[in-house]
Amino acid sequence: MSTATLGTEAPGLRFLGTAVGVTALLLVSIGAAITLGPADVSLVNVRDILLNHVAGADIPVRVSKEAIVWHDRLPRALVAAACGAGLGLCGVILQSLLRNPLADPYVLGISSGASTGAVVVAILGVGGTAVGLSAGAFAGAIVSFAVVMLISRLAGGSDDKVILAGIAVTQLFSALTSFVVFAFADSDAARGVLFWLLGSLEGVRWHDAALCGVVVLAGVAFCVFRAHVLDAFAFGDGVASSLGVDVRRARLTFLVVTALLTAVMVSVAGAIGFVGLVLPHAARYLTGPLHVRLIPLTALLGAAFMVWVDAISRVAFAPSPLPIGVGTALIGVPVFIAIMFRRRQAP
């Protein structure tokens, strides 16, 4: 085998090793997160319960532990993993389409718009199911991002204007959400909504895990299949068009995918910020900018990250869980500031 061949294969082998390692980290993280909590549950208990439900085994397990693992902690860990993977994927898409390292659903107002849509559906009684909330959140996400792009285009259309417009729209839709809660919700509903808006996985069940998992897996598969288009967008619309990409159609398709992913995550877990900002940069550090590798690795890192943030948020202030959005913000804000300073100092 020639030296040139070895040089070509080496990045692929490094990526494979990294992906296997991060996948193992994710599985260990889910197993460890399930054991954390006020009730004593061991990894052996987790193994036995999984074998009973998945493989049809008949291992004796206490009913209380089975309920804790199968009906509470496992679906919660899976929803956390799906939310981390989905929001990380949204960050990859937006940073490529806008060629801006600060782009993510939270900064660009998509999460705020989705929150407004979900709150309107929930409080005004338009629909209370997970699908109904997701539809409302999707509509809000589409509207908010359309407003961001309109404002940025009227202001000149530069990358900085997109970020500034996103910050303004975030505040606008946050205010609209607060108005809906203040004007139409009773005190109990208002407390529940405000806690949910900070990011919460309390009460998630298997149907939530199924909804998030299906949407995220479909989104990852689509983006991996279209990874070459995101690679082209990273060099600008002109280059993408010269490479045969239908720029307008591709941009619209990816933005719809981003809005759908954000809407589902927000409808289930509330507004969780900065995951889509931080995790793509961590994945690029490990595997480089090529999207066919960046997309799955970001999803895996985002999943493991959110599982641990949720686990720590759940046990650090037990019996009252810390809203998961607070945990992601405590990590994301310093990273956001560091990226801003690094971008300013770049030549």
Image: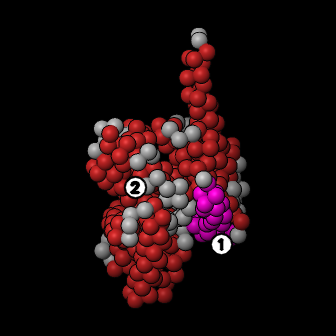
Left or right: residue 231 compared with residue 343: left
Identify the residue shown where x is 58% and y is 29%: 11
Amino acid at dot 1: Ser
Q: Residue flagged by tag 2: what amino acid is it?
A: Thr
Task: Name the residue rendered at 41%, 81% in the picture.
Answer: 176
Q: Is residue 95 visible?
A: yes
State how far apart marks 2 and 1 are (Cα). Answer: 32 Å
The residue that appears at 40% across and 38% down in the rendered structure is 228
Q: Nearer the viewer, mark 2 or mark 1?
A: 2
Q: Quadrant of residue 208?
A: bottom left
Give residue 258's mark. 2
Where does the N terminus fall, quadrant-wise? top right
Q: Find the magenta span and give its range.
A: 318-346
Residue at (69, 45) in percent of width and height: 43
Q: Position of residue 143 (x, y in %)?
A: 33, 68
Tell me residue 47's x, y (percent): 63, 41
Q: How many residues crowd mark 1 within 10 Å: few (<14), some (14–19), many (20+)? A: few
Residue bearing mark 1 = 320
Residue 81 appears anywhere in the view: no
Residue 12 among magenta residues? no
Q: Earlier in the sequence, mark 2 or mark 1?
A: 2
Q: Quadrant of residue 297?
A: top right
